[in-house]
Amino acid sequence: MKHIIFSKVATISVIIGAIFIVQSALADNPPLIIGPINNNDLVTVTGTAQPLAGGVTDQGSVPGGTNLGTVIIALKLYPNPPVTADQYNAELQDPSSPYYHQWLTPQEYGTMFGISTQDIQTITAWLQSYGLTVSDVATSRGSIDVTGTASQLEAAFHAQLDYFYDQQASQQFIGLKSDIKIPAALQEAMTGPVFGPPAIAMGGGGGVGIVSVTVPTLTSTTAKTPTSTVVSITTTATTTTTISSSSAQAQGNSNAPAPLTFWQKIVDFFKNLFRF
């Protein structure tokens, strides 16, 4: 019995250390938006225009006064988290990992993998400066919901909105006729509005509020020389991932374990320590 007690007590520092590792990883990430936003210094987000393929046809421009309803503004994941989302998801099931069974709520997911609170506030203020109303910020920090008119959104993102028709789905939708342009200061933190057929605009069913879109490159529109710098972007629909356990919990899956606070984890550990 004494040997068993000693053996269990010897693991206390390891368990507590693992919990502290997870908690330290949940500190707000440093801001990516540095310096003032210059609306005249723009970068083009290529690949954001609606492609005319697969039976999709352009039916003309959207009147400027059209109320768009809720538009999703996709945000980027933080580029240098302590551990990638894919790695964390794998280590949730690895007993040797400090992240073993350290389930994340959507809020914790956003803190660990999303952009900073300061960056979200900066982007929110920038959207509001064009008359757009911010109606919601995803708990996971993957997107911002805005409402406004077509002309307000076109002014913010320097792109034309058109009606498109998907012949295969027999459905009309609003999309971008041209690629969007955003201030260079925002390019590390924001992707832009998500349009297209509903299945695409909602991220193809991806979880926990993360909207995934394909954005191949950014090119400067204010380059001083013909050889402007091209910045590669790796945010794609296939690489934007979510934590499966968090996703199940966010969607109301009663089988997903409820997340515990730091002190609840400590208390529960000691409760179970001497159960033989």
Image: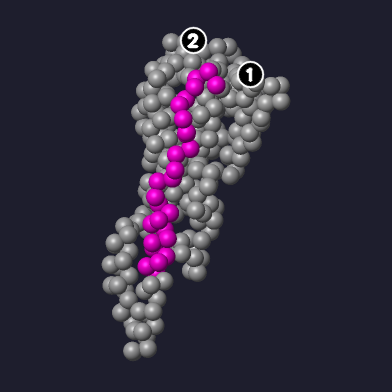
Q: How is the image coloured?
A: one colour
Q: CA separation, marks 2 and 1?
A: 18 Å
Residue at 61%, 20% (x, y): give it. Answer: 222
Q: Secondary structure at mark 1?
A: strand
**Vertical relation: 86 (above or below) 208:** below
Label disc, if present, on residue 63 of the rendered structure: 2
Query: In the rendering, at what x and y percent does residue 270 appear?
Result: 30, 72
Label disc, if present, on residue 57 of the rendered structure: 1
Picture quadrant where residue 119 is located: top left
Look at label 2 and name its amino acid. Answer: Pro
Quick check: is 137 in the magenta stretch?
A: no
Picture quadrant where residue 272 is located: bottom left
Q: Is residue 202 visible?
A: no
Q: Secondary structure at mark 2?
A: loop
Residue at 32%, 59% (x, y): give it. Answer: 262
Q: Is residue 143 left or right of residue 90?
A: left
Q: Report the quarter where the C terminus lies.
A: bottom left
**Vertical relation: 195 (above or below) 251:** above
Label disc, if present, on residue 104 of the rendered structure: none
Query: Is tag 2's residue or tag 1's residue first in the polypeptide sequence?
Result: 1
Residue at 42%, 51% (x, y): give it. Answer: 246
Q: Bounds of the magenta span?
A: 15-41
**Vertical relation: 151 (above or below) 2:** above
Q: Is residue 189 visible?
A: yes
Residue at 59%, 13% (x, y): give it. Answer: 59
Look at label 1 and name its amino acid. Answer: Thr
Dot 2 surroundings within 10 Å: few (below 14), some, or many (20 or more)?
few
Query: In the rendering, at what x and y percent does residue 42 appear?
Result: 56, 22
Please name which of the two marks, 2 or 1, marks the residue nearer to the observer.
Answer: 2
